[in-house]
Image (cartoon, helix red, strand yellow):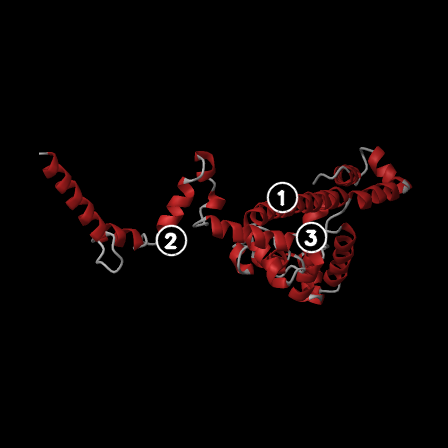
Amino acid sequence: MSESINNEALNESVESADNSILGSEPAAENTSEAVVAEVAAPEKTDSEKHISFLESLSSDLRKEKSLQTYKDVESLAKSHVELQKKFGKRFEDLTADEIKSIDTKFGAPEKAEDYGIELSDDLKNDPILGNIHQDLFDAGIPKDKANKLMEKVLGKIEDDRKNMETELKLQEESKIEAIKKEFGSAFDARKDLANKALRQFGGEDAIKSLQQAGLSNDPAIFRMLAEVGKLISEDSPVVAKESTSFGITPDEAAAKIADLRADPEFNDRVRNINHQGHLEAVNQLERLYRLKAGKK
């Protein structure tokens, strides 16, 4: 029994020694596991990298729009290095392309016309605002800030224009009131005379020039043209037959009253109710006083 056990142990020892002899064929390995280990994992797509990069950030940072353009840490690092290089330079050392690149990152458009600012026809010809798109672009102003700025500028210009129109209208009304007060009931007649003189000697060109210069209702111009119109009408036999009245201004009426009051014969007619010309003298005097007061 013991001899049998020893033989078995000896045989196992020999078999073990045979398996360890140099040159013998080694035992087969588990080749399937080795092959799997040697095959590299498939490379992630840009989209997967982008998602993976964003998922690696905190929830607050994931919401940042400025980070949405970076697909991975490497692209973020490159951008950071580029900015550091640019901002590490003095501004005057930057190239035009570098400045434009910085401006674009901060919201400046690619082209001047991309600001989309609309100007009225008169402002398009304005020496300052007519080229505002290019000026904003050259200065690298972000589009949103440029639009806010121009909204305020154009609003201020429109307010100033309306205020100016109102002021000019009030000035013209004031001039007309001054003329009416000066000429009283004779205003309409003198206005017709002034327009007649202006049309005869100046024509449409003169009328437009006076209007553009704001002189169409100027009291001095009106007074001068009315006098010229009187002279024209006095020299016209047709007009003389139709009417010799050009209206009497308050000042002219006052002067006429003073002349009549200095006339003894006229005063006698006014005082003497039995005088044949009494009623006529009284009516003449009353009419002059009405005209002096600016009434018809």
Quarter location, residue 193: bottom right
Q: Can you identify the residue that label 1 sits on?
A: 159
In which quadrant of the rendered image does the N terminus lie?
top left
Q: Secondary structure at mark 2?
A: helix
* Left or right: residue 28 compared with residue 185: left
Q: Secondary structure at mark 3?
A: helix
Q: Nearer the viewer, mark 1 or mark 3?
A: 1
Amino acid at the residue labelled 1: Asp
Q: Residue furthest front?
A: 3
Distance, label 3 to label 2, CA atoms, is: 85 Å
What's the CA distance linking mark 1 and mark 2?
A: 54 Å
Label 1 crowd (10 A; few <14 / some 14-19 / many >=20)? few
The residue under label 2 is 46
- To which residue does mark 3 refer? 191
Tell me where residue 180 sits by quadrant. top right
Which amino acid does the dot numbered 3 rest on? Lys
